[in-house]
Image: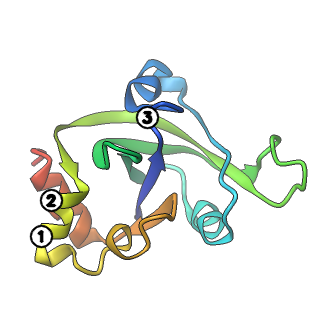
Amino acid sequence: MAHWLVKSEPATWSWNDQVKAGTKGTEWNGVRNHLAKKHLMAMKKGERAFFYHSGEEKSIVGIVEISGEYRLDPSDKTKTFGLVDVKAVKPLPKPVTLAQCKAEKKLAKMVLLNNSRLSVQPVTDQEWAIICKMGGLK
C-alpha cells in the first residue's frame, strides 16, 4: 500500500475539523494542480496519508485514511479536477514540524522538502516509518 501526505491551511480545514467529521469523513476537494491530481488518482481505498497543517504551523499533525477513491470534483466547473474521501484515523502524539523533517538526513529526498507547495504528495515507506517514530507512534 502506498502512503501519502495531504496539506491544508488550518484556518480553512484543520485536523480538528477532520476529526469532527467522524467516521463518515469528508471529501478532499479543491485541488487544482495537475501533479496533485495525478496523486489523487493513484490513491486507493484503505491507504493512509499524513495530514499536514500548512501556513504558519507547518507540521504533520495526524493520519487520515482514504475512504473513497478518485472522482470528479463537483466544485470544479471545468470538470478537470477530482477528489477523494478521507477520514481521520489518529493524531500524532507529537506533531512533526517541517523544521524537524529538514533536520532529519534520512528525509532529505522527501517530496515535502523538495516541492513544498504540492498539496497532495507521495511518501515512501521509509519516510512514513521515520515520521511515525518522530511523531510518537510505534
Residue lying furthest right in this view?
78
Circle 1 crowding by C-alpha within 10 Å: few under 14, some 14–19, many from 20: few
**Left or right: residue 43 compared with residue 19:** right
Tell which of 68 and 50 is nearer to you.
50
Q: Amino acid at mark 3?
A: Pro
Label 1 secondary element: loop
Q: Residue 18's x, y, as percent?
A: 46, 29
User: Which coloring applies here?
Assistant: rainbow
Q: Please give the name of the residue rendered at 26% of the width and 34% of the height, measured from the top-left corner.
A: 91
The answer to the question of whether label 1 and label 2 lie on touching residues, with beta carbons closer than 8 A, is yes
Tell which of 97 and 136 is nearer to you.
97
Q: Please give the name of the residue rendered at 88% of the width and 55% of the height, measured from the top-left corner.
A: 79
**Left or right: residue 17 compared with residue 103:** right
Residue lying furthest front in this view?
56
Q: Which residue is mark 3?
A: 10
Quarter of the image for residue 110 reads bottom left
Q: Amino acid at mark 2?
A: Gln
Q: Amino acid at mark 1?
A: Glu
The answer to the question of whether label 3 and label 1 lie on touching residues, with beta carbons closer than 8 A, is no
Report the number of discs: 3
Q: Which residue is mark 2?
A: 100
Tell which of 108 and 138 is nearer to you.
108
Q: Which label number is shown at residue 54?
A: none
The answer to the question of whether label 2 and label 3 lie on touching residues, with beta carbons closer than 8 A, is no
The relative height of residue 75 versus residue 69 in the rendered view (above or below) is: above
Sequence-first tag of 2 and 3: 3
Label 2 secondary element: helix
Q: Which residue is mark 1?
A: 104
Q: CA distance from mark 1 to mark 2?
A: 6 Å
